Structures are given as C-alpha cells and as structure tokens.
Image (cartoon, rainbow, N blue to C red):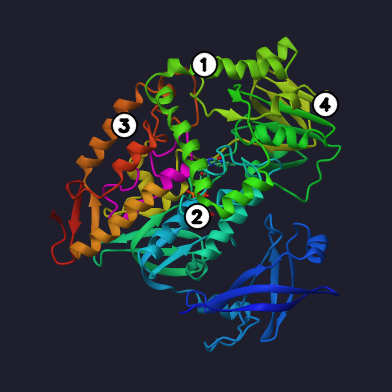
Amino acid sequence: MDEQGYAGPATLAIGPDRYEVQVELRGAFQPIDGRFHWYGRIAAHDGLAAALGSARVTGTLVTPEGQAACEVSDPDPWRRYRVSGRSTPPFAVATDLPPEEDEEDEQDAATVLGHVRVAIIGTGFGGLGAAIALRRSGRRDFVILERADSVGGTWRDNTYPGCACDVPSHLYSFSFAPNPAWSRSFSPQPEIRRYLEDVTDDYELRRHIRFGTEVTEARWDAGVARWRLSTSRGALSADVLVSAAGPLSAPALPDVSGLDTFPGEVFHSARWNHDYDLAGKRVAVVGTGASAIQIVPAIQPAVSELTLFQRTPAWIMPRRDHRISGPEHWLYRHVPVTQRLARTALHVSREALVGAFTRRPGRMRAAQRVALAHLARSVPDPDLRRALTPDYVMGCKRILLSGDFYPALTRPNVRLVTSGLAKVEGSTLIAQDGTTAEADVLILATGFHAIDMPLAARIYGRDGATLARAWGDDMQALRGTSVAGFPNLCLIIGPNTGLGHNSMIHIIEAQIGYLTDYLATLDRLDAAALEARAGAQQRWCADIERRMGRTVWATGGCVSWYLNAAGRNPTLWPGSIREFRRATRRVDLSEYDVLRMNSPRSSA
Ligand SMILES: Cc1cc2nc3c(=O)[nH]c(=O)nc-3n(C[C@H](O)[C@H](O)[C@H](O)COP(=O)(O)OP(=O)(O)OC[C@H]3O[C@@H](n4cnc5c(N)ncnc54)[C@H](O)[C@@H]3O)c2cc1C
C-alpha cells in the first residue's frame, strides 16, 4: 500500500494547551493489524520544548485535513518531536479506512495471520536489521513478531539509571543509517532506543510488526516444508524463520536460597522498577558486570547505603566519553563523509585489538597497566584497591569501561562485599564468606541466559525434537546461523558470533547479508528449503574449537558467562570482523542440503 501524508501547519492540543506547529507526517495502512499507522516530526518549537522536555505525552493533532489522537515523544538534538498515532490519521487519505473496532474485536480479527515468506522474531537491532534487508531486496511478504509493545529489544528493556552503550555510538549503529544526532560518544539508552524507533519509521517497518505477539512454538512441518508458528495472538506459517530473539534478552536470576523471604523490593537490572524510589534506601546490588558498573555510580548519590556484592572483580578501563559538540553535529549532518570516517577510524582501532583476544593474550599486559593506573588514580585505599584488582588476564571476562564506578566505591555510603550473595534471610543478605548486610531493596545485576537461548526450547525441527534438545548444553550452528535438522531457520547472533572487542552491529549486518543471500538462493534454485549438513556444521564448529584454544577466553584463568558447563565457549567469535564477514558473504551450497517439495532432499 502506498505511503500517504501531509506537510504543513497544525495545532497540537495537549490538555488545555494549544501549540501552533509545523509538521511532516506520513503513514500507511497495515494489513497486518488492519489499521492505518501514521507518524512524523514536529518542527522545533520553543513553547513545546519548554513545556514537554523529554516527556512522552498524548494529545490531539489538528491539521486543515483532519484531526487525530496522537503520541508526542523523543525530542532530537534539534528539538524536533516525534509524533505518531494509529487508526484515522489527521490528514486525508485515498484509502478507504476500515471502521474503528473495539480492542476485543480487533484482537479476534488479528488472531490468525496466514502464511508469509519470512517470519522474524524480535525487534532489536537484529530483527529490525533483518527486516530492513528484506525490504531493501524488494521483499514485502514478511512479518516481525515482537512480544513487547514497542521496538528496541535490549534498548527498550534496559532502562536502569546510567544505561549506555560501551561501544562508541558511531560504531554501535547501522552502517547504512548513521545518526548525526548522537549527543555523546557513548550514547545513553534513551537515545539508542529512539534511534531504533526512528529506523523503524524511516524504513517503513511498522506495517510489518505485530506487537504483543510472543512466539510460543515454532514447528517445522516437513509435509509442506514450512514453519508452523504458535503465538500469543494466534497461528501463522512461514517458509523461513529468522530468530533475532536476542542473546541477552532473558534475565538470569542468581541461585540464592531464601530470595522469596526478602521483605523489600527486588528487581533485575533489565526490569528496573521506576515506580520504586531509591532515595534514602539501603540498597544492595548483586554483580559487578557491565550493568552494575553503570548502575552503582548513577544511584550512589541518592541512596543512604549501598552494598555491592562482588564475586570477581572486572578489568575496568577509563571510558573516554564526551559530549559531541555543535560543530561536530553540523559536520556529521552536512558533510556525512566525516561521520563515515569517524566510524571507520573507530572500527580500525578496535580491529587492531582482536589479536590480543584471539591469538596473543600476552599483549593484554599493556592494557592491564592502563587499567591498573586507572584503579590506582581512583581508589586511594590499598585494601579496597586490592579487592578490586582482577587475578586473571584482561579480556577473559568482558572488559568494562567506566570513569565513575571506582570513585563511587570510595564514597562513605558504599561498601564492597568481596564474595557473592549466597543466602537471604528476611532483610539480611549473607555472602558466601559469611559477611552480612541489611537492605531495603535488592537489585540483581546478574546478567542473562546467554548460553541457553530460551527460545531454543520452543523450536521443533525436522525430527520433532527441540533445538534445546538437539543442542543439549552446547549450542552449535553453521556460520552462527543455520542448524542441521532445522531447515530454513536462520539465527541472528547465533552460537559463536559474540565479540569481545567490537560492535555487535557488525556481526548483525554480516548475518543479514547472509540471510539475503540465503533467500536469493532459495529463489534461484526454486527450492523449498536449505538445511545445514551435519558434517559442514561439525567442521565449522571444530575449526572454531581449534581456534578457541589460543584465545584469552580459554587461557586467561577466569570463569565467565561466555562458557558452558563443560567449559566450552559457544558464545564468542574467535576472529576478526573481516573474517566473519568473509565467512558469511555467500551461502556455500556444498554445506547445505537442498529440499524440494517433490524430491525431499538433494545435493547441490
Ligand atoms: C545493557 C546492555 C548493554 C549492551 N551494550 C552493548 C554495546 O555497547 N555494544 C554491543 O555491541 N553490544 C551491547 N549489548 C549486546 C546487545 O544485546 C546487542 O548489541 C544487540 O542489541 C542485540 O540485538 P538483538 O536484536 O539480537 O536482541 P535484542 O535487542 O535482545 O532483541 C530481541 C527481541 O526479541 C524479542 N523476543 C524474544 N523472544 C521472543 C519471543 N518468543 N516472541 C516474540 N519476541 C521475542 C524481545 O522482546 C526483544 O525485543 C548490550 C546488551 C545489554 C543487555
């Protein structure tokens, strides 16, 4: 369906207030939910900016062509607001809009989705990136299934104070959608989330997304060579299933006895309770990973006491974060090549580090000296310094970046417990070494189910067994994407695709390139499906295993969340981005069985 829109003056009514604004709007009817989705920008407006700040509000937008309820949110650095709405738009459309339905009828109407060429699970960087690739290759017959009610994945779910990326923003964004508006070199979560909302609009993805739709089961139906999906809102089938359900999207809770006896508030860092006021409270934070080191300095000034439970200290490098200046913004906007150059420079400097992770961990010593100097500068107390000094090689666990974590630990209201939380007895928290602390609130910064992808228990392959069963404790996939026994299943950020040194967006882009070629190959061969050959998958994984032996993750002397119970690393890619790109540039048909509807299995 064609895009339709309006540009010109409008009146925005928010409560009793009226603002005369200039808008640019567009929208389209979405067959997926049977509604018209419209969205656009309100030009910079002093009165609006003063009244709203960064708040998200609802109101009514009136143009000479009509009026509609709307949501106004997310001002960008040029103080333009995003405006959006569903159903009747505030401008004339050529399309006959379906009559408004009440919520219940609408749910019923949308329960069965029919058949699509591709079903994508998730609207994080992975799912949105895959959807953009499909649209760019001219495909429209796909749907994106998202259990939440908005896009963003990681960047929608992690809203804890201080949340920001730890890879520079110029790198932590799509190469084809640079954002000249990043406010800082390491952007805060709300900006990354807004970026993903904007990308969703700019690439016209909303018409493909079904929010509030959790995939509860995906079953390969060999009879018709397609995936049959059950979701919380009905069933559908798809020729190809793309899982971009996220490597870090299911919070992991610690194995602590008596957690249910804690009388106060308990929440995971990825499910922050913003209704709970931490001011003046005794707060305990469990964990010293990437989330905890952002949370601690952000909440320390407000709380009365902060107890931090640390199992293992992390290597922490100073984070050279800075505000991006007006002239830089101007350059990135008006001379886009400057931002591409900045991205390239960052990428090259990060790639230069890969050898230290994958082949010569001894080279980490120079970086360790920088981190130790940072620690010495920030923490005068020798006992505290000792407690914060790692005893393994840098890089073995994720290297963290922070300029304010160590200083926060030196404040009088902060106490470091150098032992993991073992037991809870009412409001008393007991560490493994017996140390106790009293708390009103417990914040679990304890990471995610990274090595036991929860969706795997819901995906049933050719033989009727789940992916979780096929994997056991050891996730394996061909080129991080395809799994033997699971035809036409493509994993974005599948096994052995994670990075210790660079942005995950590079990996996602390489994989969506592979997906594009995969779909083109199916079309070219007029095949029903491709299925990774077990031998090809084994060779790929054996090669990874061989290379893994030399990495810092295997030799660095630590236990990390990268490793499974057997001590194998099914999480990380033991090579450079360039190698991964090369490995995923094209589908190699010698690694796949080609399934045709009349002759179930053939070799290419
Ligand atoms: C706090 C934090 C900070 C990070 N910072 C960085 C960084 O600085 N640099 C970096 O490279 N990486 C970082 N990462 C890693 C990050 O996860 C990846 O970079 C990337 O965002 C993953 O994108 P994704 O689309 O694969 O997954 P996600 O963003 O997790 O999206 C997965 C989506 O799938 C949906 N979903 C899951 N299961 C289902 C289901 N059954 N049905 C329907 N929908 C489902 C989820 O709701 C979610 O929206 C960070 C991770 C976290 C948690």
Q: Which quarter of the rendering shows the N terminus?
A: bottom left
Q: Are marks 4 and 2 in contact (CB under 8 Å)?
A: no
The x, y position of residue 316, in whole percent, is 61, 24
Q: Quadrant of residue 412?
A: top right
* Helix, strand or loop status at disc 1: helix
Q: Which residues are magenta?
A: 480-508
Front residue of 217 and 412: 412
**Badge number at residue 413:** 4
In the rendered view, does 411 fall on the left or right side of 487? right
Q: Considering only vertical position in the picture, is 51 above or below 383?
A: below
Q: Which residue is mark 3?
A: 544
Front residue of 285 and 253: 285
Three-letter amino acid code of the residue under disc 3: Ile
Q: Are marks 3 and 2 in contact (CB under 8 Å)?
A: no
* Helix, strand or loop status at disc 4: loop
Between the C-alphas of marks 4 and 2, the distance is 43 Å
**10 Å neighbourhood of mark 4: few (<14), some, or many (≥20)?**
some
Three-letter amino acid code of the residue under disc 4: Asn
Between the C-alphas of marks 3 and 2, the distance is 32 Å
User: Is the shortest distance between ligand 1 and the CB of mark 4 under 8 Å?
Assistant: no
Viewer-nearest of discs 1 and 3:
1
Between the C-alphas of marks 4 and 3, the distance is 46 Å
Give the mark nearer the N terminus: 4 vs 2.
Answer: 2
Between the C-alphas of marks 1 and 3, the distance is 27 Å
Give the mark nearer the N terminus: 2 vs 1.
Answer: 2
Give the mark nearer the N terminus: 4 vs 3.
Answer: 4
* Helix, strand or loop status at disc 3: helix
Between the C-alphas of marks 2 and 1, the distance is 35 Å
Would residue 381 be counted in the magenta stretch?
A: no
**Badge number at residue 177:** 2
Three-letter amino acid code of the residue under disc 2: Ala
Q: Is residue 602 visible?
A: yes
